[in-house]
Amino acid sequence: MPSRPALLSQRYIFRFWLPLALMWLMMAVEQPFLAAVIARMDEPVHQLAAFGITFSLALLIESPIIMLLTASTALAKGKQSYGQLLRFTNLLSGVITAFHLVFVLTPAFSWFVGTVIGAPKALIEPARLSFLLMFPWTAAVAYRRLWQGVMIRFGKTDQVGLTMIARLVATGGVAIAGLIWNFLPGAALAGLALSAGVIAGAAAAYLWTRPILRGPLSQPEPASDQISMRYLLDFYIPLALTNIINFIGRPLLTFGLSRSLLALESLALWPVLLSLAFLFRSVGFAYQEVVVALIDDEQSYLALRRFALILGAATSALLILLAVTPLNDLWYGRVSGLTPDLVALSSIPTLLIALTPAAAVIIAWQRGVLVYVRRTRPITVAVALNVTVLIAAMWLGMQFLPVVGVTIAAAAYMLAFLTESGFLATQTHRARQKLMIKDQKLSPTT
């Protein structure tokens, strides 16, 4: 990366953001790829539905560790602060991995999937095997995100994308081998492929981070940058709650879909639809860490906001174009390999979620500003509003609208994101006022 200019330019923001966006884009490609593999194996509808349940549970169980990327980007400034982050990562990933194994190896899994989610009985055991094969998932993701945050903190964003290449090669290799030799059912194969991928990504992240660990992070930081475990918890818990609350809503959508009109078809189409939404939203996810790393005054605030507006408009426009043209049938039919009846259900839900990419970019910018000023609690409140609206809209739609479940879910999903961004807009305005006060204090004329 070139050195940062005195005034933050759109070109520099783009150069800093691009490798991180490619990282998320590569992760986003992973889901449609796995769905396409499953769709070409035996019992594609049942296996896609089972993997949809598995992946929702995997996202839920990993949710406490997702914000390690943000935490390490914001806080890893020297030997002491990195040491605290590493100890925290060890503890968190160990506890969650143990819970994962206990949950999947006991009757708790069949009770949760069958009774709480309400999935058809035929999906429980395929989902269990897939989820069991994903037990390394959380720990591998935790360490990868810790080390990727370190790279971002020290301006090594180019190297972040290389860790994702390692992940995709491993995931794709296992999935293609399973498709050729058919040694596992589709959902289980996807779970194994994801585990192989995240382990490879974590190993690559560690290798690329070693020069930083032996260099800047082996040196003591100023006392003002050191962090206690209590400070880390106060900073991190609201961020972790953000993801926990957020991911609770996704299995609840699965719960609603299992009781909706055309339940099996909705359950089969929903993970493919989400993977498409994730593909377009993924470039926005990267923007939160960009904002945390680059914002420091009102000028950078305005430059980063402008970039977010441009990026959000462009990504949503592309998804709208896909939804209203023959590209929709091409994506779901040819690329994803869905049956004609599922392709026929896809166009309206796709159009309904078309604004989620823009919302994702704006929310990432808003969250990044709040993390920079150390106000993480409003982020939790915003996500709680998101999930509340999501559940309410899904329930009301199922009660009063004779509409296919996946269409109701897509509408609820979009409305929830718009609500979250609207609340964060009020909080971001307050953060901007703090930046203006900081500029006034630093100005030589005051």
Image (cartoon, rainbow, N blue to C red):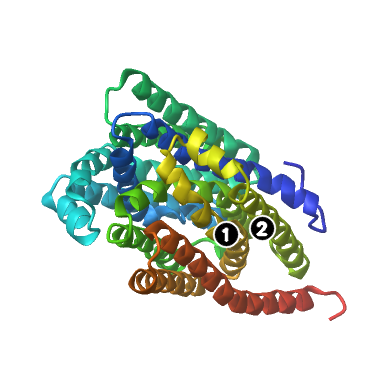
Q: What is the x, y in percent for residue 63?
A: 38, 56
Question: Which residue ends up furthest to the right in the rendered image?
Answer: 445
- Type of residue at label 1? Ala
Q: Residue at x 22, y 58 (%)?
A: 118
Question: Can you identify the residue that label 2 sits on?
Answer: 312
Residue appearing at x 75%, y 62% in the figure:
306
Depth check, front residue: 441 or 352:
352
The image's mark for residue 426 is none
Q: In front: 399, or 161? A: 399
Compared across the picture, whether 98 is left or right of 62 comes to: left
Quadrant of the rendered image containing residue 298: bottom right
- The answer to whether marks 1 and 2 mark residues whose Cβ atoms lie closer than 8 Å is yes
Q: Position of residue 21 (x, y in %)?
A: 61, 45
First in sequence: mark 1 or mark 2?
Answer: 2
Q: Residues within 10 Å of mark 1 (few under 14, many from 20)?
A: many
Disc 1, SS: helix
**What distance separates the C-alpha of mark 1 from that of mark 2?**
8 Å
- Specify the quadrant of the image occupied by residue 191: top left
Quadrant in which the C terminus appears: bottom right
Check the image and report above or below for 231 versus 149.
below
Residue 343 in percent (x, y) is at 46, 44
Going 51% across and 56% down the picture, which residue do you hit? 348
Percent coordinates x, y for residue 374 in the rendering = 55, 70
> Which amino acid does the dot numbered 2 rest on?
Gly
The answer to whether any part of residue 390 appears in the image is: yes
Q: Please count the marks in the image.
A: 2
| Mark 2 closeness class: few <14, some 14–19, many ≥20 residues within 10 Å | many
Closer to us: 334 or 211: 334
Q: At numbered mark 2, what does the secondary structure look like: helix, strand or loop?
A: helix
Vertical placement of residue 107 versus 297, above or below: above
**Depth check: 310 or 12 in front?**
310
For mark 1, what is the residue?
360
